[in-house]
Amino acid sequence: MPVTDRAEKKGKPNLLLVFTVVMLVCVLAKDEAAAQAITVTPADPRISVGQTQQFTATGIDAAAAVEAGVFHQCALLLDATLRCWGLNDYGQLGNGTFTSSPNPTPTAVAGIAGAAQVTGGGFHTCARFPDGTLQCWGRNSEGELGDPATTAWMSATPVPVTGITSATAVTGGGFHTCALLQDGTVRCWGQNDYGQLGNGTVSSAQVSNATPVEVIGITTATAVTAGGYHACALLQNGSVRCWGQNDYGQLGDGAVITPQTRPPTPRPSPNPVEVRGITTAVAIKAGIFHTCALLRDGTMQCWGWNDYFQLGEPAAVNASSTPVTVSGITPAALAPGAEHTCVLLRDATVDCWGDNNYGQNGNGSERGIFAPPTAAVTGITTATAVTSGAEHSCALLTGGTVQCWGRGAGGRLGNGDTTDAFTPVTVVGLGVTWTSSDTTVATIDATGLATARGPGFTTITATSGDRSGSTTLTVADGTPVTRFTLSVVRQGTGSGTVTSDDGLINCGGGGACSASYDSGTGVSLRATATPGSTFDGWSGCDTISGTACVVTMSAARSVTATFTRQRFTLTVAGEGLGNGTVISTDGRINCGGGGACSASYDSGSRVILRARAGWLSAFDGWSGGGCSGTGDCVVTLGEDTMVTARFRLLGLF
């Protein structure tokens, strides 16, 4: 993923090469179009009035994964081909062309079939294949394509990465690339001016390092992520190690990074360092100048650049070289960008915060800088993945469609336009649209489920991009079956899921919050609170037993499940012969200063306590809540907690 364009183009591609590549792309496009006819199944089915029929389509351009480059975007399709859109000045779209013009709609990557993963870098892109090999394309001035035989400064078509045959993951940085191998080691190649290759060396930004080198001391990695000029690895024991640029503290090792000038003081670190305090990480993701980790308890911590509150903690002024907790956020996946950060939440919605000058928060709010909590990204309720570039983000939705928001320059939003979008827009040509030619005979929903309404014939059509496929549905006469809709509403301060035993409803879990049932059908629902929340009860049910609700359909029905965010009490006590005050940075605790010595907080809240010694007294340190020493006490609430501050009289020990 990640970074800024600080380097200029160094040359122009050979014209003969360009002509050859264009011819190759034309041939591939023709063959691809012939091979990708859409087939709708089952073919020509017959049902009766009131019955339903589930249709499926093969050969559609449905996305299975999305990954942002800094100024471009790519999607891995269900058929294991790739589509990319956005900036293409270095050939990073892989379609055989170089152009400074916008590319606002998806284009096929030439010659790629059977891909298992795609990753976007600053001005290059890479794909991983099931056999552990890699191919890259785009900018190559720094050797980021990983092929010493490719000496051109850019390639508009994929080239193989040398020596990599067992990759389990690949990640694109600003001008470097890294791969995780099956044996738990990591290889990196490309620019190394900040030590981002992790092999203990630093070289000029203009030096090309096209041959992958092994990162020092990493032998048990389970994930790797590359930022603008740094990279990090998640290890089997839940710790994280990072290397490369540390100007903003993006390595998380607690290094002294003050004063924070703009531009910052260069702080290269060519050897991996351990991120301070993280021992239970389950996922990591690098932004351009910051990094985030998802912990085993569901919380999220970030470190690095924070001018725009992208760390989610305004108290970390400008930057933090130690991880800070993003309060109130329990993500399912992480997507840090440049000046903003997005997360996929467990209820399939997306939240973003930080800079919103181009609409990066995606919730329609005005231009500005916003710290969490923020309103959710508008209209997204079925996301399965999210990814962020420098100034834009995209979400993969159920059904293979993709929506993007933020800066539209270069066409990186994929909606056929270059206008900034403060709420999500749909990427052209990905996913499938279902239609029925005669809705008096049968209607069909977005998932391909047709419902017979009356006798006759109707054509069921699946459309993806500029291609379509169809079949004929025959509906026989008969007594119409009365059907009613059951709707589920979730309310309260907490979160959770509601599922039906038949699987038709999975509200909050990425599925539908309503379903249609034949009259007289009994539907069993079950509520499950997410960690940090409790289930408080049902309304609208026929019978209730704990978290279970049963409804018999005799009319349209609506049931409500209430979830409440758990709250815990933080209590401060003083001990010793001295005196002083303890205050929380949020102002809710002011113990010894005329205010409260306890306060109630939502589960997962991060509270910072500061002790101030009184007259003729000294502060000796903390106990409880995981705090020690004489610095700030930082408590993350997961239970009722007591913290004690010790004060002594001066001159006494």
Image (spheres, rainbow, N blue to C red):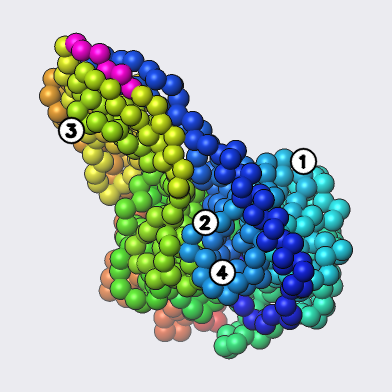
Q: Nearer the viewer, mark 2 or mark 1?
A: 2
Q: Earlier in the sequence, mark 2 or mark 1?
A: 2
In the picture of the structure, the residue carrying the numbered disc 3 is: 558
Q: Amino acid at mark 3?
A: Ser
From mark 2 to mark 1, how far is it between C-alphas?
26 Å
Q: Amino acid at mark 4?
A: Leu
From mark 2 to mark 4, how far is it between C-alphas?
11 Å
- The residue range painted magenta reads 473-478
In the picture of the structure, the residue carrying the numbered disc 1 is: 131
Q: Where residue 123 sits in the image (x, y, percent)?
A: 64, 69
* Any part of residue 161 in sight: yes
Q: Where residue 244 sits in the image (x, y, percent)?
A: 72, 71
Label 4 Cα neighbours within 10 Å, binned few <14 / some 14-19 / many ≥20: many
Q: Nearer the viewer, mark 4 or mark 3?
A: 4
Asked if the residues shown at circle 2 and circle 3 are in contact, with their CB atoms under 8 angstroms apart, the answer is no
Q: Amino acid at mark 2?
A: Pro
Q: Earlier in the sequence, mark 2 or mark 3?
A: 2
Q: Earlier in the sequence, mark 4 or mark 3?
A: 4
Q: Where residue 567 sits in the image (x, y, percent)?
A: 33, 50
Q: Is residue 248 left or right of residue 235?
A: left
